[in-house]
Amino acid sequence: MKAVSLVQPRQVAIVEIPEPSLGPEDVLIETHFVGLCGSDLSAYRGLSPMVTFPRIPGHEVSGVVVARGASVPSRIALGDRVMVSPYSNCGLCSACRLGRTNCCEHNQTLGVQRDGVLTGLFAIHYDKAFVSRSLSFEELALAEPLSVGYHAANRGQVSEVDTVLVLGCGTIGLGVIVAAARKGARVIAVDVDEAKLAQARRFGAWRAIDSSREDVLTVVRDLTDGEGASVAIEAIGLPQTYRLAVEAVCFAGRVVYIGYAKHEVSYDTKLFVSKELDIRGSRNALHVFPAVLKMLEARERPFAEMISQVYPFAESAAALGDWDAAPGHFTKILIDTRA
């Protein structure tokens, strides 16, 4: 069967691979849509230290169950529409022993450390598949990236008493915004793109700041009676926004980092101590897929508008090239593997 392969940085090919074998606890999924993630773009650019070549990308996926292993429980039936958790876990490392399998020391995410799902069929353990009987395949493909933002809001222990500063309004940032707003928090969204800021408002942001025109620290302090945000969540991965999160959060506040900074970050560390900050990483997603599917099924926000463009499978190289050339023009690209 055919698959998309990142042969080398900026070199994409359609290749032939064997059809997957099915274990007794596996489901065989016919792929319908694959969302392109920032990790796919980094791999395409040759900037991801976790990716070796060649690599089949893709981990944000929707599809239909076309076969079941003999030991798969009846709750997953032939014909079910599913999305999947793309992470692995060893069960033995310190994170796994604490139940935080999302940050397993030996995790291998589909399309990153191991081959992904930008192909026609794939097999996966049944406990990684999550069923929705009402979402479209396009909507299902949004569940995993929204879950990453939802998990970050959980890492920040966001509640209705919080003012949450979200730095970055891409796909992951939108996931944070909708989750934080759903928890009752007052959300301040920051970006340099007016279209993304307008979208952030539709996804629940109370206030949007264009950081190319306004001083973020000044606005945040004005909005919080000089205190700063109680939670700052960074979803960009730039040294300046890493520092801004620490500067903009209040005393005894919480800082959550999702974005991977591509360069070293320097801090005035006295703020860590003087503010007695909780500084937390947020990796992947943990136990939130059912909640995110319910949120999508309730159509609480205009989730479908996150999809900027759909490319047919044969034009996957063009999709990555277009995104590379103009990253600000896209929120979410989907690949239709059947087109």
Image: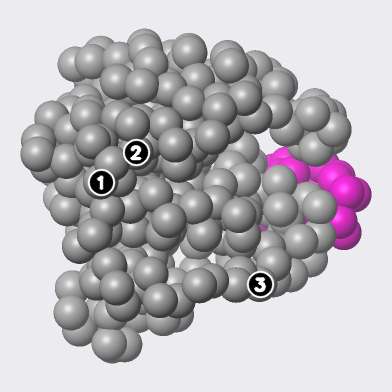
In percent of width and height, residue 232 lies at 35, 49
Q: Quadrant of residue 261?
A: bottom right
Give 193 or 111, whichever is nearer the viewer: 193
Nearer to us of marks 1 and 3 is: 1
Quadrant placement of the C terminus: top right
- The secondary structure making up most of the magenta span is strand
Q: Distance between the residues labelled 2 and 3?
A: 27 Å
Q: Which mark is residue 221?
A: 2
Which residue position is annotated with label 3?
A: 264
Residue 99 picture quarter: bottom left
Q: Nearer the viewer, residue 163 or 122?
A: 163
Give the residue displayed 66% in from the left and 48% down from the top.
40
Residue at image position (56%, 28%) is 214
Identify the mark at residue 227; answer none if there is no mark: 1
The magenta stretch is 1-20
Decide: marks 1, 2 in contact (CB < 8 A)? yes
User: Callout 2: 10 Å neighbours few (<14), some, many (20+)?
Assistant: some
Q: From this view, report whether residue 13 is shown above or below residue 88.
A: above
